[in-house]
Amino acid sequence: MIRKAVLPVAGWGTRFLPATKAMPKEMFPIIDKPVIQFIVEELLEAGVENIIFVTGRHKRPIEHHFDINTDLEKHLEEVGKKEVLENIREISHMINPIYLRQKEQLGLGHAVLTAEPAVGNEPFLVSLGDIILEKGKEVIEGMMEAHYRFGKSVIALHEVDEREVNKYGIARVKEIEEGVYIVEDLVEKPSPEEAPSNLAIVGRYVFTPRIFDKLKETKPDKGGEIQLTDAMRLLLEEEVIYAYRVDGRVYDTGNPVDYLKTVFEFALRREDVREELLTYIQEILSKQTQLIDKP
Ligand code: UTP
């Protein structure tokens, strides 16, 4: 059984500085819900309740978000904002999390290794704290089911534009059934010419506990970070790794442009925001066109 999910949220978020100096990017709002809550909800919907956050010293707001805030509850009660109050209470009781400190930001692989004492000797999930999946529940369920069938690690892959493979970890795979693969190799940020496929690693993983041994063997890269992909390549030498194709949109919220695109897409799906936003976009677009048309 997979009971535990590790959420590494200790990174510096340098692509978002100065916003991330004091505020975790995982707490950035998609309209009015922080990114990390989407990821927690996806896990809960798929039946995973034990959430292990790997945090850093600047990540306290995440702990506060999932904690009870009695002053706020009292205030909302006093002003009669019942619906918001219910929502706030729900979030406080959503999970009973474990928080572990990654004392130095030595990479994603190192963050996952930090969770070993809380995970122990059992298979577990890893979900990155800045990637939202449109079909998150289905993906987690599909990956867990593949793990139960094959008994091995399963990583999520997503088809990306062939010209953009150099932004991702790319897998060489053999498809064994529709959307399920055996991973043959993993290449970090290949050029489009060298890329073995356009299937990119997407931030959801099921690991056998053997990954911890491999993380301990993994040497730091040029930047001094222990990369999860390097440990997965070591794991590949002794265990089969399976892959599960993610269908539906993948929203990366870890950089400003993709974050803004995510906010827009979610806003356009919200009935209370959609109309006003569309009118506004049309207005500014027509102003832009007028500016371009003027010599
Ligand atoms: P990123 O590659 O997005 O790194 O990490 P980052 O530090 O968060 O952001 P940038 O690149 O500087 O802008 C992927 C995931 O791994 C976590 C991050 O919090 C993020 O969820 N991570 C990364 C850690 O937990 N610890 C680390 O040392 C590095």
Image: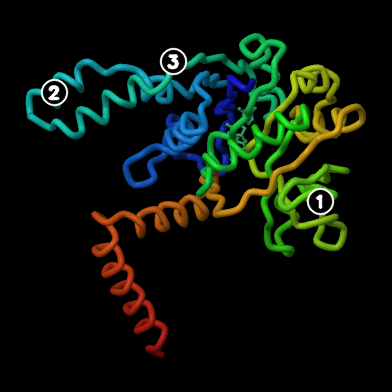
The colour scheme applied to this rendered structure is rainbow
Marks 3 and 1 in Cβ contact (< 8 Å): no
Tell me how far mark 2 sits from mark 3, CA to CA: 24 Å
10 Å neighbourhood of mark 3: few (<14), some, or many (≥20)?
few
Where does label 3 land, which residue?
Answer: 96
Where does label 1 land, which residue?
Answer: 175
Name the quadrant where ligand 1 sits. top right
Amino acid at the residue labelled 1: Glu
The local secondary structure at tag 3 comes to: loop
Question: 189 and 78: which one is in front?
Answer: 78
Marks 2 and 3 in Cβ contact (< 8 Å): no
Outermost residue toward the left in this view? 79
Report if residue 221 is visible in the image: no
Q: Which of marks 3 and 1 is nearer the N terminus?
A: 3
Tell me how far mark 1 sits from mark 2, CA to CA: 55 Å
Where does label 2 land, which residue?
Answer: 75
Q: Position of residue 73 (x, y in %)?
A: 19, 21
Q: Relative to 254, is 88 above or below?
A: above
Marks 1 and 2 in Cβ contact (< 8 Å): no
Q: Residue at x 56, y 54 (%)?
A: 248
The local secondary structure at tag 2 comes to: helix
Report if residue 80 is visible in the image: yes
State which quarter of the image contains the N terminus. top right
Judged by depth in the image, the label closer to the viewer, 1 or 2, is: 1
Is the residue marked 3 within 8 Å of ligand 1, measured from its CB? no
Outermost residue toward the right in this view? 237
Q: Which of marks 2 and 3 is nearer the N terminus?
A: 2
Residue 205 is left or right of residue 272, and the answer is right
10 Å neighbourhood of mark 1: few (<14), some, or many (≥20)?
some
